[in-house]
Image: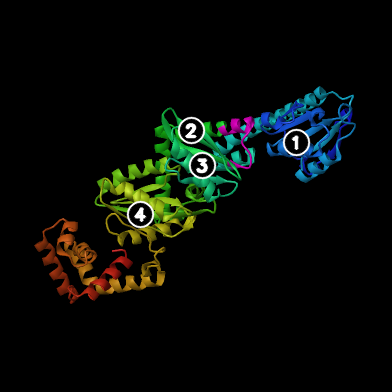
Amino acid sequence: MAQRRLELALRGGAAGLGRQLDCAVSSELVNAGEWLSGGEVLLTTGMRLADDPDLRRDYLRHLDEVGVAAVGFGVGFGFDAVPPEMSEVADDLGLPLFEVPLPVPFSAITRTVLDQIAAQRSARLVSATKAQPRMTRAAASGGSAALVRELADAVSHDVVLLDTGLAVVATAPRTIATADLNRIRDLVMRDPASAGAVRVTGTATITVARIGSGGRTYGHLGVVGPIALDDVERMLLGHAISLLAIEHAAPRQVSRDVADVHDDVLALAMDPAGSSTVGPGLRRILGRAADPSGRVRAVAFAFTDADAATHGRRRLVDELEHRWRPVFVHRDGPDVIAVLRGDDRTDLAAGLLTMLNATAPVSGGIGSVTLARDVGESVRQARLACRSAAVGQMVDLHGSRSLLAIDPVRRALNDAFDQRLRPVLDHDADHGTALRESLLAYLEANGNWGVAAAAQGVHRHTLRHRIERIEDMLEVDLSDARTRAELLLMMLGAGA
């Protein structure tokens, strides 16, 4: 309309001038809409519309229904001007209706449309050539989350990265609506090995693309927007998929070296004596495990022995890599500590426990959400929760509002533990015995001799003899449930 040489005049539908168009065609068919797919500028002289105003109104309505972008009406043949009823309907529909003077050939309009589309495509390609290096830099410096943000900005759509379990790894620029997220998962589940799929809903177009290398699948990218991706945007999506596949298929030794560095950083942050030596550089490394708000939460897994914990650590490293998580995993004796994002739900930790428990007995506990620099506190809470858990159980003391999660309560229990259990602690220190461990096993088994003896790996008579000695030292009756409960709380609260 802005091309003065065409001398076009808008006669109706000004509200629709923002419609998207992709080509220009001409037709004198009364039912031309049946051969159109939407987005066209339709050029006509209206010669077959005759003198029936209702037919002319229905003609425009049908074109609007199929998504025609605009109608060019050539005058000087069947009509000297655009019929007024067509202008009225065009205004009602918001369908641009413009008048084409007799000297202006339809081919001139078609050529102008093609030139405009070519210019826009050229501009989009230039924009894409600038976006691709930005995406590459984002992937190199910030990983998958940064790449997702850059892709979302480049295509002006919402983007979500899912791992192979269809859990959300990263989203941008905002959280994907639950309904759209479920649709993305449905598309993946129909054919997980498919390279991609598109689904159109009443409010959005959803595009899903597989991230993989050869026959292996690492995850999926979902893109949600009001319209489908164009060729340039699909090219950018393909570039993002390649970058993500390269990141996830990094040489195994590189991944192991990074995991080992993260292990050392976590060990320093956990150690009260060494945490002060964690400088800004190491804190930045630890921040890789955090959510966008800089928060983390620790998970503790207790195995039967150090060998089982070593094997469990390797499985946990593989699983976190599989879930697109930065790997911060540390083995400390029979315990394995991992760091999750602060926005990760307890369900994720429970799923990791289920995976580990499939090959070895293990219990788990999860700490509260803290800033990355305070991960040591979350680790202490996770270990306390883990000591409260049975085999195969994940305990969240903060989530369950346990008394053990309250600092003053823990301090009081710790003081009471030191006073009440002192004879047992001194005996173990002087004679190299393990009465404290036997007592804890007995209390955690709620007085069940068979379960407690199995946990200690001793005969029931041996355990009974130890408990009788403890009763004499502490001057208590451990057959009393309340006494057992008080001692168990003291031992758990003190980290026994």
Q: Which residue is mark 1?
A: 59
Q: Which residue is mark 4?
A: 300
**Kind of residue at badge 1:** Tyr
Q: Quadrant of residue 452?
A: bottom left
- Name which of mark 1 and mark 3 comes first in the sequence: 1
Quick check: is 19 in the magenta stretch? no
- Give the x, y percent position of residue 294: 52, 53
Residue pointed to by mark 3: 161
Q: Quadrant of the N terminus?
A: top right
x then y, percent, for residue 460? 11, 61
Q: Nearer the viewer, mark 1 or mark 3?
A: 1
Sequence-first tag of 2 and 1: 1
Q: Which of the numbered marks, if any, corresponds to residue 224?
A: none
Vertical placement of residue 238 versus 310, above or below? above
Which region of the structure is painted magenta? Answer: 224-237
Q: Residue furthest bottom?
A: 475
Amino acid at circle 2: Ala
At a point 28% along the width and 67% down the height, the residue shown is 491
Q: Residues within 10 Å of mark 4 (few under 14, many from 20)?
A: many
Q: Is any part of residue 432 visible from this angle?
A: no
Q: Are marks 2 and 1 in contact (CB under 8 Å)?
A: no
Q: Nearer the viewer, mark 2 or mark 1?
A: 1
| Marks 4 and 2, how far apart at CA | 30 Å
Circle nearer the viewer, 3 or 4: 3
